[in-house]
Amino acid sequence: MLIFNLIQTSKIQPMKKFLLSALTLLFAFSMYAQQLPRIIILATGGTIAGTGASADRAGYTAGKIPIDELVGAIPSVKKIAQISGEQISSIGSQDMTIDIWKKLAIRANEIFEKNEADGIVVTHGTDTQEETGYFLDLLVNSDKPVVLTGSMRPATAISADGPKNLYDAITVAASPKAKGKGVIVSFNEGIFDARDVMKMSTTKVNAFYSPNTGPIGQVYDGKVEFYQASMREVNEKTPFSITTDTKLPRVDIVYMYADAPPDMIDMLIAKKVDGIVIAGVGNGNFNKAYMEAVKRAVAAGIIVCRASRTPSGRVVLEDEINDEELGTIVSDDLTPQKARILLMIGLTKTKDRKQLQKYFFTY
């Protein structure tokens, strides 16, 4: 308005031309900015926001840098999206909680329901990133992209991978190609389906991979390409929902190993938990001591799911173990930690064993 008034009152023709050009450029920039995708970053902490005492040492403290500073470190990202950030938590992801999961899922659904953004990026520690991604995949009811990312090196380290991973994640979230792909993990230029991805290395920058399916795409030099998509139900069709008042049932994981005693299972029976996931050997197998303990758990009304500690493959229903007779269900190709998530959420809707098994073959 000020420039417009100056144009109207100026008696010098060159000045009028200059001011008119300035107004035109300002209008064009405003229109360009409005056309950029709107991306909201939900920050939870993690290594990507970590600081260390020395650039050449591995030690650091997670979750110290606020999201505004992380985005400020990559100014070129403003050319591809309108960015805003919200700090959900500031923790290392080993301290991730169900309450924070609920905050993330509820806030993500609210953002899309109110049309506040065209995509969401979640910055997250790598230790439990795969679990948070799958939790959101089951509960976010939108075909708009939700992209998780993080880093293996803190922001203060030599060759920190956080800025590049964050830039790539924003690029993916801003891409029309990401629509309808469910929740995604973008890491080290790979794009992975959140249901299938696993952390495969403790320290390497290429820490994530999907052993059963591989990546669904890649992001490189600001270009996003998808090569495949999950055949599972996309998240917009999920039957699950939660509110702030939702209390998720307690489900625990018990690890199987050679000559393992049944003490942990019996302890959980005494605790009256709602579900137990057995991280079995091979095809979800366990020894005779576990077998008898599982029978006691099922008799106590606890849902028991057979998963595997093996990083790839499926646990097959009614194969080496008679699940119908034993009263167990199987995780299909979900890892024990993801089977726990689906069982927790599934138990908010039903305790019917056959329906719960259907969830595992669907989601």
Image (cartoon, rainbow, N blue to C red):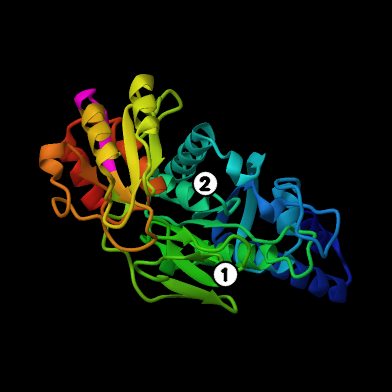
Q: Which residue is mark 2?
A: 116
Identity, as a three-letter code, of the amino acid under mark 2 = Glu
Dot 1 falls on a residue whose secondary structure is loop
What SS does tag 2 mark? Answer: loop
- Quadrant of residue 167 within the rendered picture: bottom right
Residue 216: give x, y in percent of width and height: 40, 70
Residue 225 at x, y percent in the picture: 45, 76
Mark 1, Cα crowd under 10 Å, few <14 / some 14-19 / many 20+, is some
134 horizontally vs 169: left or right: left
Lower position in the chain sequence, tag 2 or tag 1 = 2
Q: Which residues are magenta?
A: 299-305
Residue at image location 26% in from the left, 56% down from the top: 283
Residues marked 2 and 1 touching at CB (< 8 Å): no
Mark 2, residues whose alpha carbon is within 10 Å: few (<14), some, or many (≥20)?
Answer: some
Q: Is residue 11 shown above or below 348? A: below
Task: Say which of 225 and 149 sits in front.
Answer: 149
**Residue 36 in sight in this render:** no
Q: Nearer the viewer, mark 2 or mark 1?
A: 1
Residue furthest right in the image: 12
> Mark 1: which amino acid?
Asn
- Residue at coordinates 59% horizontally, 50% vertically from top-left? 124
Query: Mark 1 highlights which residue?
Result: 206
Q: Is residue 261 visible?
A: yes
**Is 360 left, or right, of 25 in this rendering?**
left
How far across and down, in percent of the image, does residue 268 sit? 37, 27
Q: Is residue 329 left or right of residue 12?
A: left
The image shows residue 98, relative to residue 35, as above or below, that is above
Please identify the residue farthest to the left as the structure is shown.
325
User: What distance separates the C-alpha of mark 2 from that of mark 1?
Assistant: 32 Å
**Residue drawn at (33%, 67%), measured in percent from left and top?**
229
Q: Residue at x 51, y 40 (%)?
A: 104
